[in-house]
Image (cartoon, helix red, strand yellow):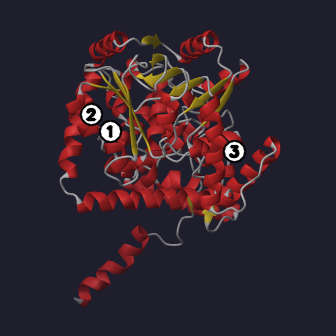
Amino acid sequence: MGQLPFDPRPWPIRRNQALQDQTMRHTIGFVTRRFALAKRDVYRKNPAIEASRQAAVGQKRQAIRDMPRLLEQFRAQVEEHGAQTYMAAGAHDAIAIALRIARQAQAKLVIKSKSMVTEEIELNQAFESAGIVVRETDLGEYIIQLAREKPSHILAPAAHRNRHQIDELFHHDASQQGIQPPVSDEIAELTHYARFRLRQEFLRADMGVTGGNFLVAETGTLVLITNEGNADMVTSLPRVLVSIVGVEKIVRDWSSLVQIIQQPAMSGIGRHLSSYTTMVHGPRQSASAEGPDEWHVILLDNGRKALLGTEFEDVLSCIRCGACLNVCPVFREVGGHAYGSVYPGPIGIVETPLLTDLQVLPEIPSTLCTLCHACLEACPMDIELPHHIVALRRLKAKRRLNARRLDWTMRTWARFWQTPQGYRRSVQIARLAQRVSRQPRILHSAPGLFGGWFETRDMPAVAAETFHEWWPKHHHTGASEK
């Protein structure tokens, strides 16, 4: 069973806070719609992309099935090139290995490229507790580090903040550092400030830390894709490099990579390829002018291997493109932080409970999905997200993880709606209840055991006359007129 950090606050509290944050809702809505439209346009203009996508799905599925063998091949190739590899069963193991490497290197300052897996294991907090300064070098990650927040989107960690809020963060940082703050909140000025600050960290860092988008078993190569180029600096300037990567990132060979590497950019931001592709093949060789003296690769399981051979295996094919987040109507309303996990959106609804065997945030499959199937249509890897969400709901009920009141409400509702007569009776009861409670438009609560439904949602009030009630009164008249 894996370990994931999570927000312990109850879902209604997280939900209400998100819905009250109008800035977040505006910026998240703007960013996700822009990404979704860009994806639509690139697919429309390039019909051949679909064949490439289908090939990538097949290659990635096969790599997941062959994961144990490919991981051994990858490790052998990496070690042949002079680097070290480690298998970490869980978050604590990965942190212990990374801290040991940092202490042996006497590292005082660590620079990082964007990495969801290091967010998953809370590496920054562990380093800081050990007295090691950590600096995020991706612009979005740098912003949320200053704000002491978690990422709100897989691709755009600071998508919930506007430039005025970012300007305030940078001014506060500048006052602490005793340096000149941005001259305005224009994007160019904010970027200039971040570039100036991070350049100093790049040059002083003792150790670099990366995640990884792909691991090529054939050659033992780590592949990173970014849009800012910071990964090039992180992997080449510090004398020690540590890469922490989930085991599911494995691909067989370069021909597989060619198909798969296009998918995150095309589906996530509507581009044929990310701006920068960084490949690490080993530590610096004697004839090389740059690169780390040491390279350490930590391969993290943390609940992933337990999904092999199960109905949820295709979840391991996720390439972290964020396409499912960009089309999800729930995500657009509440943003990433309401999910309570480092992995938000439809993929997070599935992955967070699965990696932890439903020990962390088991409520999110039932509360944060409308089963509209938009995520399945958007996913470039054909992950059956709606099916998995329903399966998790079923598993929750089987394990009796739902609140008793909610379970009773659902069972009662199901019994009523199994027959037309029961459905009509439930409408009559609901109409009477809303009159008594004086909630003519939106129902926010219900008395007694019926309140289970309203613990996480509201419901439109029953109409004064439903279509089923209207139809018998009018359809005969319409037929005679014809």
- Give 38 or 444, whichever is nearer the viewer: 38
Q: Specify which label sits upstream in the sequence, 3 or 2.
A: 3
**Circle 1: element type:** loop
Instruction: Nearest to the eye among marks 2 and 1: give it.
Output: 2
Residue 294: image x %, image y %? 49, 15
Q: CA distance from mark 2 to mark 1?
A: 19 Å
Q: Is residue 225 visible?
A: yes
Residue pictured at 45% horizontal, 11% vertical: 86
To which quarter of the image does residue 346 belong? top left
**Residue position marked by numbered label 2 in the rendering:** 257
**Residue position marked by numbered label 3 in the rendering:** 13
Q: Specify which label sits upstream in the sequence, 3 or 1.
A: 3
Mark number displayed over residue 383 = 1
Q: Mark 2 and 1 residues: CB-CB less than 8 Å, in contact?
A: no
Which amino acid type corresponds to the residue marked 1 in the rendered image? Ile
Q: Specify which label sits upstream in the sequence, 2 or 1.
A: 2
Residue pictured at 44% horizontal, 53% vertical: 326
